[in-house]
């Protein structure tokens, strides 16, 4: 299995790695800074550099559904690296940092709206949407003001691991109805913005809420009887 460096350090932009396999879908390596799409966050893009200096773009990163392996999809017609070959991996940091800020902003929204989350995703264009079961729509201006209070505050993030049994004992931690945290691996990753929000999450986040900065609420739309879709953007 690939060592997932982004779990320990979301700020790691590059790493050395070796080729473990080339599948029809892409490249598998022994360790990686590339986040695979999941939990509403897009997969990382970036580059790999071979020993001879050849640079190949990584178009997407995902987990293989059957094997669970982390796969880096290379651009079309890229030369195929050999098993065991040393590589240098580098993510598109500007894009990833934007995704980290947006993802963390969604945690702040969860802190403000203590209702079940029914869906959500982050887009490449610097916006994200989050859906809640809410009978009445929140006031847009008040929500935006409260959100920006949090995204400029000194609120450190920490990640910790708990067991499946510990999560079962604290069902209130699970905010997302549509996506249950993965079980069976024995442990689940909890992400906590100190004193504000705590929930199972495998994504990448900023180390402190104040890194999120200015956020705009673009729209609040009704999607079904209870469902409200809130779209937000980095300013
Ligand atoms: Zn998260």
Image (tube, helix red, strand yellow):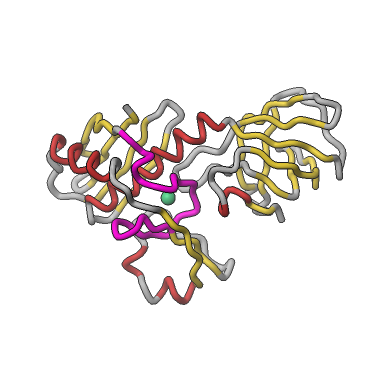
Q: For the magenta stretch, what is the residue range?
A: 191-213
Residue at 48%, 35% in the rendered image: 97
In the rendered image, which quarter is residue 81 located in? top right
Above or below: residue 126 compared with residue 137: above
The quadrant of the image that shows the N terminus is bottom right
State the image coordinates of residue 194 (x, y, percent, origin top left). 34, 58
Residue 4 to residue 162: above or below: above
Q: Residue at x 36, y 72 (%)?
A: 170
Give residue 98's position: percent from left, percent from top.
44, 33
In magenta segment, residue 128: no
- Residue 19 vs residue 156: left or right? right
Q: Please give the name of the residue rendered at 49% of the width and 46% of the height, measured from the top-left corner.
A: 204
Q: Based on the displayed image, in which of its 4 quarters is residue 67 positioned? A: bottom right
Residue 6 spot, x, y in % from top left: 58, 48
Say left or right for 216 vs 39. left
Q: Which residue lies at the image location 29% right of the left edge and 41% below the top edge?
A: 152
Query: Looking at the image, which is closer to me, 122 or 7?
Result: 7
- The percent position of residue 126, horizontal first and vertical second, equals 40, 29
Query: Is 209 left, or right, of 184 in this rendering?
Result: left
Q: Quadrant of the C terminus?
A: top left
Tell me if residue 198 is in the magenta stretch.
yes
Q: Is residue 21 visible?
A: yes
């Amino acid at each position: 299995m690939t060592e997932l460096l982004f779990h320990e350090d979301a700020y790691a932009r590059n790493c050395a790695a070796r080729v473990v396999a080339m599948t029809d879908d892409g490249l598998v390596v022994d360790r990686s800074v590339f986040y695979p799409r999941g939990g509403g966050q897009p997969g990382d893009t970036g580059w790999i550099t071979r020993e001879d200096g050849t640079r190949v773009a990584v178009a997407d990163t995902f987990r293989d559904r059957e094997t669970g392996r982390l796969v880096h999809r290379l651009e079309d017609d890229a030369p195929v690296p050999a098993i065991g070959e040393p590589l240098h991996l580098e993510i598109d940091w500007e894009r990833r940092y934007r995704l980290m800020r947006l993802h963390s902003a969604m945690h702040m929204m969860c802190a403000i709206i203590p209702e079940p989350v029914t869906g959500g995703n982050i887009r490449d264009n610097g916006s994200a949407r989050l859906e809640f079961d809410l009978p009445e729509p929140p006031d847009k201006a008040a929500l935006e003001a409260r959100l920006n209070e949090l995204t400029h505050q000194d609120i450190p993030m920490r990640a910790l691991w708990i067991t499946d049994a510990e999560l079962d004992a604290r069902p209130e931690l699970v905010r997302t109805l549509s996506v249950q945290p993965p079980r069976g691996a024995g442990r689940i990753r909890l992400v906590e913005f100190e004193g504000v929000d705590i929930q199972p999450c495998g994504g990448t986040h900023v180390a402190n809420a104040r890194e999120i900065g200015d956020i705009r609420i673009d729209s609040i739309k009704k999607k079904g009887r209870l469902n409200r879709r809130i779209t937000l953007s980095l300013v």
